[in-house]
Image: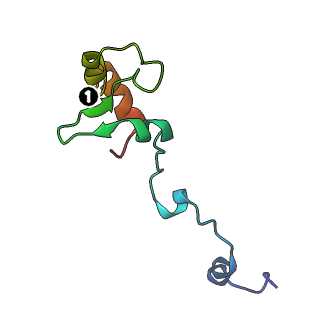
Amino acid sequence: MFGILTAAARNAFAVKPQGQAVRGMAYKLKSHSGAKKRFFPTSNGNFKRWKVGLRHLNVTFSPERVNRLSRSVLVNNTQKKMLHKVLPYK
């Protein structure tokens, strides 16, 4: 059957892959699920996080320490570089 068709007709019947490379699209990067839940972007490119150590075993903590641990803080520069890699769309 394909012997009598022209080259243009053969190309019309050919099965072509529809992947990202054929359509000229770029690959999508996945965000790290744990980082999405723990770090929140600010408007100037930093990330905000909460302090650790307040969940349990804190009966002996002073009220000042509990108040200090309940505040949120900004990440340092090393963590910020890492977070820009694992959260590419934030």
Q: Is residue 23 visible?
A: yes
Q: Secondary structure at mark 1?
A: loop
What x and y, as percent, mark residue 81?
A: 33, 26
Q: In which quadrant of the rendered view does residue 74 lie?
A: top left
Question: What residue lies at 39% left-to-right and 39% top-to-bottom?
Answer: 87
**Closer to us: 19 or 31:** 31
Question: What residue lies at 47% left-to-right and 50% top-to-bottom?
Answer: 28
Task: Look at label 1 and name its amino acid.
Answer: Arg
What x and y, as percent, mark residue 7?
A: 65, 79
**Closer to us: 67 or 48:** 67
Q: Residues within 10 Å of mark 1 (few under 14, many from 20)?
A: few
Q: Does residue 58 sit above or below 46 in this rendering?
A: above
How many labels, in total?
1
What x and y, as percent, mark residue 49?
A: 32, 31
**Closer to us: 86 or 59:** 59
Quadrant position of the N terminus in the picture: bottom right
Residue lying at the far right of the rendered structure? 1
Question: What residue lies at 24% left-to-right and 17% top-to-bottom?
Answer: 64
Left or right for 24, reference 76: right
Q: In which quadrant of the rendered view does residue 19 lie?
A: bottom right
Left or right for 22, reference 77: right
What x and y, as percent, mark residue 33?
A: 49, 41
Q: Is residue 76 visible?
A: no
Q: Which residue is mark 1?
A: 71
